Amino acid sequence: MKIISLKLNGIRSATNKGVQTWLKKQDADIICMQELKAQAADMTPEMLNPPGYFGHFHYAEKKGYSGVGIYSKIKPDSVIQGLASSNADVADIDSEGRYIECQFGNLSVISLYLPSGSSGEERQAFKFSVMSRFMLHLQTLIRSGRDIIICGDWNIAHQELDLKNFKGNKKNSGFLPEERAWLSELFDQVGWVDVYRALHPHTSDECYTWWSNRGQAWANNVGWRIDYQIASPAIAAKAITASIYKDERFSDHAPLITNYHL
């Protein structure tokens, strides 16, 4: 089973840059997308349902903002749009279109877009609030007994080897001690698995998935690894390859491709 996580920075923009053509060649079983920056009325038939795929989306209420989606070759048994079924009050999260889950038998595949806090203190506070409430949901998910893969832009680099300039970013959103500790709790205590890092425990320069548009970050490979496929242990153990595609650029993020032996 081949799964791609793909941060689009706008599905219309990425389509204009050839992402749909590239996806056809990949022949993935499931494609998880983040940051659609579109509503249903903005989507072309190809964006909604590429040939051979079923498309499902959770749009943000604000136009041209956020939004997540999943393409799958197999029609899901059920689709959960947003976190409203969780115990926490999540209306503010769901209004931004940050979570969609497709269920296939005992397998759940989730497309997730955690917020960034880089624009200021207010958004960082919202990010911490989302992290706190989402942790409760993550604890519930892993206790469900289902096989679960969560693909997306988590907007956190976990370890020093996950970004080029770790010394200069220790006080910046995305590499704050509290954010990194949250991921450590997720992996070390709750029991989730960082699939790419499990397969590539020591990779640094080749692991990045995002490069700032400022300066010469892409040219100099001054990147961050903030896109993950995070899975429950049983399905994580079936991952055989994980790679990051950089030959073409569809956004400021690179696609994360993982193959699972099922």
Image (cartoon, rainbow, N blue to C red):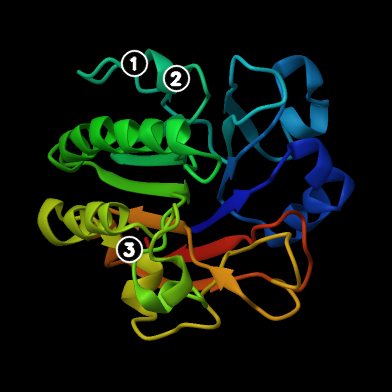
Q: Which residue is mark 3?
A: 194
Question: Label 2 sits on what residue type?
Answer: Asp
Amino acid carrying label 1: it is Ala
Q: Which x, y percent locates residue 52?
A: 70, 40
Q: Is residue 91 left or right of residue 51?
A: left
Q: Is residue 175 left or right of residue 135?
A: right
Given residues 28 and 128, the one toward you in this image is 128
Choose the circle earlier in sequence order: 1 or 3. Answer: 1
Whether residue 247 is visible here, answered yes or no, is yes
The residue carrying mark 1 is 84
For numbered disc 3, what is the local secondary structure? strand
Q: Please rate how many residues cluster around mark 1, counting C-alpha atoms within 10 Å: few if below 14, some from 14 to 19, many from 20.
A: some
* Left or right: residue 91 compared with residue 129: right
Q: Residue at x 41, y 42 (%)?
A: 109
User: What residue type is disc 3 on?
Assistant: Asp
Image: 258 above or below 144: below
Whole-percent x, y for residue 232 in the image? 24, 53
Q: Looking at the figure, which quarter contains the C terminus? A: bottom left
Q: Is residue 58 left or right of residue 178?
A: right
Q: Quadrant of residue 25?
A: bottom right
Disc 1 element: loop
Check disc 3: other Cα within 10 Å, few if <14, some if 14-19, many if 20+. Answer: many
Residue 6 to residue 113: above or below: below
Q: Between marks 1 and 2, how big is the CA–CA gap? A: 7 Å
Judge depth for marks 1 and 2 and give the one in front: 2
What residue is at 30 percent from the left and 38 percent from the top?
131
Q: Nearer the viewer, residue 49 or 6?
A: 6
Asked if the residues shown at circle 1 and circle 2 are in contact, with their CB atoms under 8 angstroms apart, the answer is yes
Reading the image, the residue beneath label 2 is: 94
Identify which residue is drawn at 31% across, 31% down. 129
